[in-house]
Image (cartoon, rainbow, N blue to C red):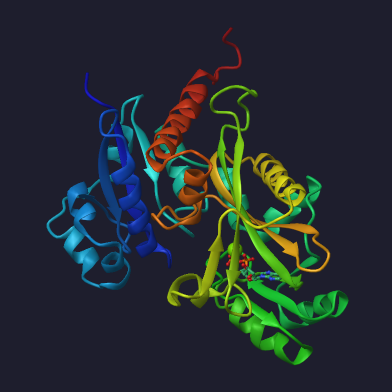
Amino acid sequence: MKRPLVLVLCGGRSAERLVSLVSARCVAASLPAERFRARLVHLGLDGSWASVPTARLLREEPRALLCDPSAVRRLRAGAPRLDPWRLLTSLGDDDCVFPVLHGPMGEDGTLQGMLELSGAAYVGCGVYGSAAAMDKEATKRVAEQAGLPQVPWAVARDAKEAAAAAKRFGYPVFIKPARMGSSVGVVKVKGPAAVAAAMREALRYDDKALVEKGYPVREVETAVLGDPWASEGDRFALKASICAEIAPNAEFYDYTAKYIDPDGARLIIPAPLPARTAARVRELALTAFRALDLYGLARVDFFVHKHTGKVFFNEPNTLPGFTPISMSPRLWRESGIPTPRLVETLVELGLRRARARRRLSADPRAR
Ligand SMILES: Nc1ncnc2c1ncn2[C@@H]1O[C@H](COP(=O)(O)OP(=O)(O)O)[C@@H](O)[C@H]1O
Ligand SMILES: [Mg+2]
């Protein structure tokens, strides 16, 4: 029998499209070849889809993919363009799509909508979960309803609203675009004089900004894996990995500390936290995952107040980095799940959801 196909989608249009290539390289390399055939599809900045030989991506060094402007050209050289719709609707029931795209137009529910419409099985969160997790206001509203502890926050559409919120919370505050990531557009504001400039920066990326009370915090993350509806004891039951701490060397974990400065932050695994705090973080991560209707995988980020030890939920990432040095694969490796098994489990989860969908009735009269 022919092995099922896993369609690894990479690239895309977001600022993280090059990180996506490094993540996709790791996914393709880790996919157990005895079980699945990997097929790599690159989504270009112009929206076109092209079939790229997997070996071509594996040959590239991660550094070159991130820094060498000709790497994408090398990947796509002579690669045949694909009709996305025909490709997706030609997949068999045992085939699966693995979208390895970070940020808007990949992680935000748009691509997931297309995958849903096509009927293809796919890895990761669905339309609602992806969209809710990408919008910081939506995330916070759902989290609030689920009783998750959060820092005081408000939505602002102009500097006047932002200044009013900041006055209520007290400085410093963080001002950020509602639907971004990678700390793009995030500014720490220490006094009223800096609010207008911070709002201008946030509103470059979105027409809606968030104002949050800034606390002195430690940053703690955990990875979640599974099917939120699987019963306990089931091998797909939802679980959280051990926790990691990120200690940025900058004033906060900004874009430079994340991607530019190799010494921008220290990753500490496991996070040196009291057992009680780590257990609480993992438990809250599962609560957030369920409340936001996430599926398959997510990395869930928290703040721990440096002085009081109080835990605050910050945000989920529904398609976290998947490079060999990325947090999620590392957390799972340290929790006893090697990356090939993680990738295989994610594909199995995608197939499991598609099978469940196919069993749903579309006919109100049929019995
Ligand atoms: N309320 C806050 N208190 C303290 N630090 C914050 C707060 N909000 C954001 N930060 C800092 O800014 C970084 C980016 O903010 P975050 O909300 O996680 O945005 P992104 O989605 O871009 O990652 C955080 O990792 C943290 O370092
Ligand atoms: Mg973040």
* Nearer to me, 259 or 83: 259
Taking the view exactly as shown, the residue that stands out farthest to the right is: 168
Residue sitting at x 69%, y 46%: 288
Query: Quarter-wise, where is residue 307 in the image?
Result: bottom right
Q: Is residue 357 above or below residue 278?
A: above
Quadrant, the C terminus? top right
Q: Is residue 311 above or below residue 194?
A: above
Taking the view exactly as shown, the residue that stands out farthest to the bottom is: 193
Residue sitting at x 17%, y 63%: 74
Query: Quarter-wise, where is residue 70 in the image?
Result: bottom left
**The quarter of the picture showing ligand 1:** bottom right
Q: Position of residue 323 (x, y in %)?
A: 39, 55
Taking the view exactly as shown, the residue that stands out farthest to the top is: 367
In the image: residue 320, left or right of residue 9: right
Residue sitting at x 67%, y 80%: 188
In the image: residue 131, left or right of residue 276: left
* Nearer to me, 318 or 285: 285
In the image: residue 6, left or right of residue 178: left
Q: Position of residue 346 (x, y in %)?
A: 45, 36
Q: Position of residue 320 (x, y in %)?
A: 49, 53
* Nearer to me, 28 or 197: 28
| Residue 41 in view (yes/no) | yes
Quadrant, the N terminus? top left
